[in-house]
Image: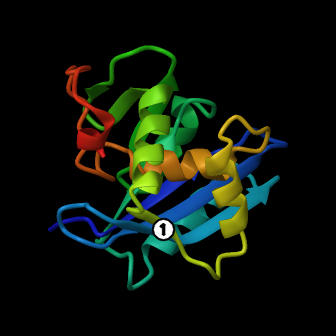
Amino acid sequence: MLTKFFIGLDLGQANDYTAVAVIERLKPEGDAYHVRHLERVRGMPYPAIVDKILKMMESPLLKRNAALVIDQTGCGRPVFDMFTDAKLDPIGVSIHGGDAATHDGRAWRVPKRDLVGCLQVLLQSSRLKVASKLELGPMLQRMTAEPGGSQKETWLVASRCCCSPVGSRWRASSNSDRSCSKRC
């Protein structure tokens, strides 16, 4: 069954924001995506976040129809394993400054420039839309205009989710000559 929804999760440290984005793939080919949910929470313990995501993924719309993509760059493997232990079958993404995407099973290492480039292609080609009624929608749109901003959690979640190995046709092959437009 083709995954229709992607849940991107950027786990913050103790005093940082944790950001969640739910993105819907509109066509089976992955040509267009809509951001359906954006949320930021601060100070929530990791076990409570696991429970929150579990409940979200058990909703009728997302159950067996969503992939969970977690940025494990900052939180590390032990926190990521909490989601695995909860049977959420997450995909882990570690972001690095290199030039090649690699993976081992469901763990991916992806260059930041690939995520940024992919998100820019999706936005500039109008293939990524943000629901106008989302409270954090304007923040996401501002952050995509200037991704170097100091509060970039939601922007990064959206890019990780949309440009993850399952969120688009982009696959981590070591072919660095492939253009971003083909990856996205």
Q: Position of residue 96 (x, y in %)?
A: 50, 21
Q: Residue at x 74, y 52 (%)?
A: 45
Query: Who is closer to the viewer here, 117 or 68?
Result: 117
Most extreme residue toward the top is: 98
Looking at the image, residue 77 sits to the left or right of residue 184; the answer is: right
In the displayed structure image, the side of residue 13 where residue 90 appears, left or right: left
- In this view, the residue in front, 133 or 120, is 120
Residue at point 30%, 73% (across, down): 26
Q: Nearer the viewer, residue 66 or 84?
A: 66
Q: What is the three-letter code of the residue carrying label 1?
A: Lys
Q: Give the residue at mark 1.
A: 129
* Count of labels in the image: 1
**Label 1 neighbour load within 10 Å: few <14, some 14-19, many 20+:** some
Question: Is residue 170 found left or right of 164 in the rendered image?
Answer: left
Note whether residue 68 is visible: yes
Q: Percent position (x, y) of residue 14?
A: 80, 41
